[in-house]
Image (spheres, grey):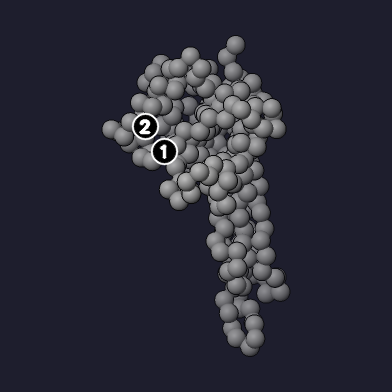
Amino acid sequence: RICRDSGRDLPRLAVIIRAGTAETPHASHILSDLRHGTMIGTRHLIGLGHCDILFVIHRNPYLMPGRRPQDDDGEYGEVVRGYVDALAEAGLGERQRLFFLEHEFAEGSGEREALRQLLSAPDRPSAVFAYGDYRAKHVVDIAADMGLRVPADLAVIGFWNTPWTDLVRVPLTSVSIREDEIARLAVESLLSPSRQSATEWVKPELVIRQSCGPKAV
């Protein structure tokens, strides 16, 4: 569809999932509320009795020195804020534990061993929430190699609800960004000539499978 502005024909755009430049002209933004996604995943684990939840995420190389991850203005900060805020609302604000990845658990990087040490410590987390299903798969595999059972010994949640959820040893609970709804709204915005450029937010949903269970007593 073509929208008209000052006598010029300009293409109507739909920017989806992640925010681009907020000032993008003549564009509708259909965005996933990533903070809500990490909040509902964390709340689910808390509801199952987990108070020590490890959050696995990539390290942001653009984060300014001295700034906390949740203080970042972009997607990265939104994701971490959901986890941090859910802990805070449950009175667990001092229990946040972040595990940063730079090499995505590549062999020889030391990240696999670092996670093994965390999962074998006396105060080990009882649950892991990984931002990315493929990262959650690595967590499950490392836990299994250590003799930890998922979900009996360790609950695990992923994010994005990708086909990786079916490639894990235990069907993976994951946060869906609801791509079908995002696509529907994007097409609707493109096919509506009178529709004004706007930002619409789609709230993710938790897809519960078998990788999460109550904290072992």
* Residue occupying the far left of the picture: 108
Q: On the image, which quarter does residue 138 sit in?
A: top left
Task: Look at mark 1 in the image and give the residue it sits on.
Answer: 101
Q: On the image, which quarter does residue 96 sit in?
A: top right
Question: Which residue is nearer to you in this view: 2 or 157?
Answer: 157
Q: Residue at x 55, y 36 (%)?
A: 174
Q: Residue at x 67, y 65 (%)?
A: 198
Question: Can I make out residue 210 in this image?
Answer: no
Check the picture and name the quadrant holding the N terminus: bottom right
Residue 186 in picture, x, y percent from top left = 61, 62
Q: Residue at x 63, y 53 (%)?
A: 181
Q: Please rate how many residues cluster around mark 1, counting C-alpha atoms within 10 Å: few if below 14, some from 14 to 19, many from 20.
A: some
Residue 209 in picture, x, y percent from top left = 56, 30
Check the picture and name the quadrant holding the C terminus: top right
Whichever of callouts 2 and 1 sits on the residue coming sooner in the sequence is 1
Residue 33 in picture, x, y percent from top left = 63, 49
Residue 139 in picture, x, y percent from top left = 43, 29
* Residue occupying the far bottom of the picture: 7
Residue 44 versus residue 19 in the image, above or below: above
Tag 2–tag 1 contact (CB < 8 Å): yes
Kind of residue indicated by mark 2: Glu
Question: Which residue is nearer to you in this view: 98 or 27?
Answer: 98
Task: Look at mark 2 in the image and give the residue it sits on.
Answer: 111
Is 65 left or right of 90, judged from the image as shown? left
Residue 207 versus residue 2 in the image, above or below: above
In the rendering, which numbered label is found on residue 144?
none
